């Protein structure tokens, strides 16, 4: 596919995701983890302007120099950043301003991408920009769900642009894998993030891994058995988290009139028993596994078995901390801050979710979040 | 003036104040003290719906019962309230929803007020609603200024609907008042808040009070003399506040290229030296007075001298804590929560400000805020 | 009485109060309001060393210059202070070190006070030192009670050096006072704090004031009537305090096996129904009064009626904020920080308590605390 | 060695470590990580009483049942625990009480251990008790250092019972290790903690590892090159930590009169340039390594190379998160809470320190702390 065609598809999809929103929905930031949708739209645009247009297009006219204060995120190399928690306080630039910003940059990019004769490094940077925006498309979905799902009026979003998720198969079964040396990490010729490199050998001991993710029905059994009230299943840090936040169920679950409902894209509705459990923290995933006398897989176990697993509807917590692979190298310059600087105090998630953009997932992909995070579409797979 | 005419003037003014805003500006809540403008518009409407229309108009159809969760404020008698700090997280109801809510209530009120034949109690309640909305009009101004003045783009608001404030006279002079018994508190036949009652005698010792409020020029002398760095002028609590928040100047002041600017309705501009100093806390007011070997007036001193003072552009901190007058009585029912429940840990401010609605000020008016508040249009008057 | 004799009585009493303590009891600081007993013993000694011995005794040898970092309190004029919350982290100087410090200073003071031929100012300063130490004697009692009463072993202290408090009379009656001008503030020739000056006129409206403080029995009626769960009786700030801290009873009260116990000097024991209620905050006092359709007296009402009241066992919350009297003047120099700097955000308490040193109380005495404080021996008197 | 003999050696050493302390030093808790020394003495005694004497010695008379509230730590299976942050508020039981508690338990244990005829499980439990107390001996040293080193009087402790640490060799050199399968984890017949099991294969890529830990001199080069002020060397979380706490040097370092001092067992003294750097966080260790274009070793790399390294004076941060080994099993019952529940959000440290009890260290030992911890004797070793 031509770069320009790909650019247009990616950029359009961000707008399509926001299509059902009211202007007010673009503005708020109910928790620090969530960014206002208008910020995502501006920040992904700022990426192309800052790393592609300004250094590579002679005579490019910056849309507004002040936007560097607003739409920079963690790229400390590029000017002073706005404190993350302040994003929800900024009513300006308006949504309309940001739409015009996108059009301005899209026009310049359209012009620029007409000619694909460019260095490999620049091409890779542009492809990184696509993947960067796809990551923010998933965050747009998770953040929009949080904003609407925590409003006392529980407004519906409508249908996700990817359509409804398929139901889960009804049975669970274990896949057994033998002991030995395996290879993990990205190997192909396409795009990958720096944290997937380099491909390397690991030694795996024999293990079993579930073919299917844990369902809501199975998770309810844990809840009904008192799982949230028995410290023996929990990490000490997880147990403190449960008690401090009075956690009794996954995020978005509501117990009303003796039935379990959850907030979905259509508003409050009955919990679908057969769907994979969603919006759980690492602490909950690990406690559930302990209650089942099992554990979570490591990321190497997961990746090695991936092609025989049913995956793709939930980001699955693994028992692996997010750390550099042997031989990991940061990219030079500002792009080098992309992943390496977060390699502490986070756990790896593997798979993809119902709101991951098509084409963005692969079995070597390393997603990562703090163990308490659950506004993502996170789920559980067992190993033993 | 007919109730209906007064109703329309008051309600229109709230909308006029918001006229220069973008939709996004209606939504955010940068600090707890500030409420989103759309909340003010909804809350003042909810007042008339809850206290006038629902109990007194047969067949009145509530606009949306869920709005009780959103627009209730501190009236604990009337249903569960939304936690105040959450107001800035609510993207819904939208601004347009709230405009329609206002129209819905305004139509019903218009119908209802066509006939002024009603009990005195009800009439007083409606007049209370006018004064309530006027209070929120002042808060709209203070909150809008905070929202725009803390945006890194420093957007202009335009002209205040009341026009620019007149310049202060250039000289300061003391007015001397003799010892003796005085009377303070509301006495007339018009509207007053419950906290202005009942009129009562106080004993005043001889005092001097400045005819004019302190100017920016005079306050700058305090700053240049190191006032913010010498604990001797400060209350212990004020000194902690200065150091914790690294306060160096009034709110909205910026020291850029060796000049003092401030954020005004037109954006950043040169500090007008002769204008009354604005946006100072009680701590700063008291420290300034101590540095001048003076003090702040008590509210009784202020009220007794009021008609000989130049007042009305700033809310002036007094040395009086906000406490009940002798014989103070709470009104029965939910309205009784209006003022009495705040009579602790606040200081009284007297006067009015450049954004106080016309007709809303009087010399017996008791405004009150926590001593650290400075997003209001607060200023300083000396006594000794 | 000779200064020297008075000095010895005061200094000995501080030691006698600490006599039942274990060394470990001298060290801890369970909350910020509480200071470790060894700090009180050191700080009161530091007062005499710093303000009397060092400036007035030629050749006086300071015990340890580093003690200035440790035993200074809020006197910002005299060197850098230790952050208050750190006091409980300091294991050194040891209790024994501090005892030796007291002996060192007492010997020098004994020498110095043999000759009473000194300036009036110096004599007044020494008397201020006596009163200062007496204030800390009361704090020693309140802080020791907190330290022992919050230990899960509930160790007994033994008998207070002042003996057990007398029982309260069994009836409550109102004293009525007419409207008119009264005078309050210190007038005699003895010692008073600067905040009791100057004596001045006030205008009082007719009022009733209870002759007796509220008893535990009466307060229990408020609790049993649901007083802690009905917001209507509370200030907004008090209601937040009740809910945030889940307050259900006065401090030191424990509901065990369906009976009310409290921690007393002898450990846990049955609540004495007839004793004046103790260890309540201003919020609780005001809520109780509101529930009784009454209010708290102002400090002027209290002082004017004092000689006809039964007072002295509890510090009684008044409805007056702690503010300067007309004509109040700070003393020059470090001593001037004594009281004035606290005149914000505190309420006045009048009376004295069962742990106030004999001779330290008078009807013009103005004690003050933040409205949430209740580790002092605070109680309630009604007015209307 | 007989169990009884070993018991006495271990128990005596805890007392010897505390020998230079004043009673007051036993009581305080300046930060949450630190426990008061008297708590360590009581808690290790409680271990033997609770897990050995009460279940296995008929007729054993518990010293004081209330001690379960005070000396329990994280063993949630055994009764309610005291909130950890409260330990520094408890003046009782006194140090003398705890000494008597130790004697009471030591006598009963002496009686019990006279006959070594017991089940293997019980013998293992007792040996676990020895290792548990040895862990607390190291904590006693780290906590005592914190208590004395944060007192403004900087009191000396005296000589450590293990004597002064030997100087570091003056050169640094890399050891190279080839790619291949290695085995790590405990294999011998003696004692190990559950987290060292089970021994298992790992695949290692070729690596270099420094023979010597990083010295103060080398670390100063990082500081002088601006290492603490250049975000490029830091994890995002580490950079936030540096800025929030204004970190400029390792813990206990003081820059006075243009020289670097540190607090040592003898008080403040000149920083020894050749000694291994100590009291650094994981963030600092990783930033230093990044500045040297190197990294920290993984725990598998460390263990595989251990016998050729100079180790034992510092706990060395590794690049490995603290996670279960393949096949890890929790012990059943309360003992099972020992290690597994902490396997989240912590990094592994390998080696031992100058205050690790003799006989307590081995190359398979997995120590672990949160990446911000630096009151332990932590240091840095490079790999690449």
Image: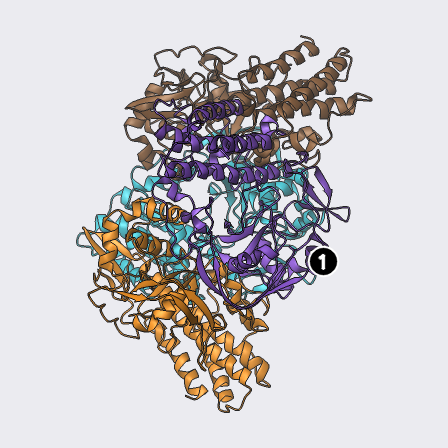
Chain colours: A orange, B cyan, C brown, D purple
**Which residue occupies 56% across, 86% down?**
A119
Q: Position of residue C326 (x, y in %)?
A: 59, 29
- Relative to A14, residue C238 above or below: above
Residue A24 visible in the shown view: no
Q: Position of residue B178 (x, y in %)?
A: 60, 31
User: In the picture provided, is A265 more to the left or to the right than C18?
Assistant: left
Look at mark 1 in the image and give the residue it sits on: D171
- Relative to D312, residue C63 above or below: above
User: In the picture provided, is C342 more to the left or to the right than A95?
Assistant: right
Residue B378 visible in the shown view: yes
Q: Position of residue B302 (x, y in %)?
A: 55, 39
Residue reaching furthest top?
C1
Q: Position of residue D315 (x, y in %)?
A: 58, 49
Query: Which residue occupies the foreground of this view, B52 or D214?
Result: D214
**Which residue occupies 34% across, 13% down?**
C171
Q: Quadrant of residue D58?
A: top left
Residue reaching furthest right?
C59
Query: Which residue occupies the foreground of this view, D219 or C177?
Result: D219
Q: Chain of mark 1?
A: D
User: In the picture provided, is C153 more to the left or to the right than D332?
Assistant: right
């Amino acid at each position: 596919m031509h770069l320009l065609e790909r650019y247009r598809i990616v950029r359009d999809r961000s707008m399509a995701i926001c299509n059902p929103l009211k202007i007010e929905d673009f503005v708020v930031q109910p928790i620090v983890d969530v960014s206002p949708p208008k910020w995502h739209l501006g920040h992904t645009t700022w990426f192309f302007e800052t790393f592609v247009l300004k250094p590579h297009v002679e005579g490019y006219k910056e849309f507004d120099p002040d936007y560097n204060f607003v739409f920079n995120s963690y790229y400390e190399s590029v000017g002073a950043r706005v404190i993350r928690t302040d994003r929800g306080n900024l009513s300006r630039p308006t949504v309309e301003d940001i739409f015009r910003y996108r059009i301005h940059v899209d026009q310049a990019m359209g012009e620029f991408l007409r000619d694909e004769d460019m260095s490999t490094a620049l091409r890779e940077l542009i492809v990184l920009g696509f993947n960067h925006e796809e990551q923010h498309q998933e965050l747009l979905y998770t953040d929009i769900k949080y904003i609407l799902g925590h409003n006392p009026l529980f407004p519906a979003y409508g249908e996700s642009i990817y359509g409804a998720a398929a139901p889960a198969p009804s049975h669970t079964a274990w896949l057994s894998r033998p002991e030995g040396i395996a290879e993990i990490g990205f190997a192909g010729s396409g795009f990958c993030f720096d944290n997937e490199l380099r491909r390397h050998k690991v030694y795996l001991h024999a293990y079993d891994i579930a073919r299917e993710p844990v369902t809501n029905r199975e998770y309810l059994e844990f809840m009904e058995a008192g799982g949230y009230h028995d410290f023996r299943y929990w990490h000490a840090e997880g147990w403190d988290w449960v008690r401090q936040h009075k956690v009794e169920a996954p995020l978005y679950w509501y117990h009303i009139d003796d039935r379990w409902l959850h907030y979905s894209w259509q508003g409050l509705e009955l919990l679908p028993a057969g769907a994979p459990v969603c919006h759980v923290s690492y602490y909950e995933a690990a406690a559930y596994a302990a209650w089942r006398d099992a554990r979570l897989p490591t990321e190497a176990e997961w990746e090695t078995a991936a092609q025989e697993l049913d995956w793709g509807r939930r980001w699955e917590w693994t028992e692996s901390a997010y750390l550099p692979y042997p031989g990991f190298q940061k990219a030079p310059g500002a792009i080098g801050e992309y992943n390496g600087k977060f390699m502490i105090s986070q756990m790896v998630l593997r798979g993809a979710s119902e709101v991951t953009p098509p084409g963005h997932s692969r079995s070597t992909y390393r997603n990562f979040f703090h163990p308490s995070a659950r506004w993502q579409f996170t789920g559980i797979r067992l190993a033993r």
